[in-house]
Amino acid sequence: MACYVDTVRSYPGKALRYTEFCHLLADTRAELHTMADDLGIPRRFFQDHAWRWHHDLPEHLRARAIELGAVEVTMHEVGALLRARRAAWSDRGVA
């Protein structure tokens, strides 16, 4: 089981506190919440989608997440993770 961070991307022109961020994902919600807690990310920022659940991670916290054990992944690897989650979610008859 692991947590993952993808590449930092820029989101200019958005009404966001941070416009440079990546995504923090994990194999389980519990792992994601533990990592977010360790990084000081408030639970209210959890993006609770059916199979795309994640946290947006500001650029300045990415290195700390890696220090805490998050694995750097590409967008293709994120896609594979999300496809697997969606398949598992669909197999439960939710789709």
Image (cartoon, rainbow, N blue to C red):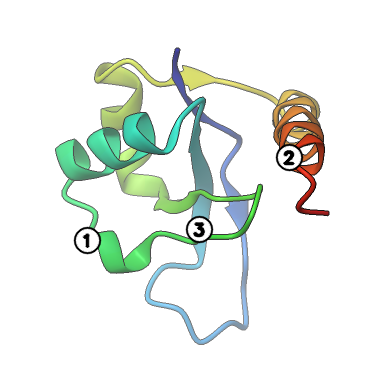
Q: Earlier in the sequence, mark 1 or mark 3?
A: 3
Tag 1–tag 3 contact (CB < 8 Å): no
Local secondary structure at mark 2: loop
Residue 86 image position (x, y, % from top left): 77, 40
Q: CA distance from mark 2 to mark 1?
A: 30 Å
- What residue is pinned by disc 2? 92
- What residue is pinned by disc 3? 20
Q: CA distance from mark 1 to mark 3?
A: 18 Å
Q: Earlier in the sequence, mark 2 or mark 1?
A: 1
Q: Residue, x 33% and y 34% (percent of image)?
A: 30
Q: Residue, x 32% and y 29% (percent of image)?
A: 65
Q: Residue furthest bottom?
A: 15
Residue 17 image position (x, y, % from top left): 37, 76
Tag 2–tag 3 contact (CB < 8 Å): no
- What residue is pinned by disc 1? 42
In this rendering, the answer to whether 46 lies above or below 75 is below
Q: Nearer the viewer, residue 8 or 75?
A: 75
Mark 1 Cα-neighbour bin, 10 Å: few <14, some 14–19, many ≥20 = few
Q: CA distance from mark 2 to mark 3?
A: 35 Å
Q: Select label 1 or label 3 by which is in front.
A: 1
Residue 7 image position (x, y, % from top left): 61, 36
Residue 90 image position (x, y, % from top left): 81, 42
Q: Does residue 60 appear left or right of residue 79 in this picture?
A: left
Q: Earlier in the sequence, mark 2 or mark 3?
A: 3
Q: Nearer the viewer, residue 59 or 39?
A: 39
Q: Nearer the viewer, residue 12 or 85?
A: 85
Local secondary structure at mark 1: loop
Q: Disc 1 residue type?
A: Pro
Q: Residue, x 62% and y 74% (percent of image)?
A: 12
Q: Disc 2 residue type?
A: Arg
In this rendering, the answer to whether 54 lies above or below 38 is below
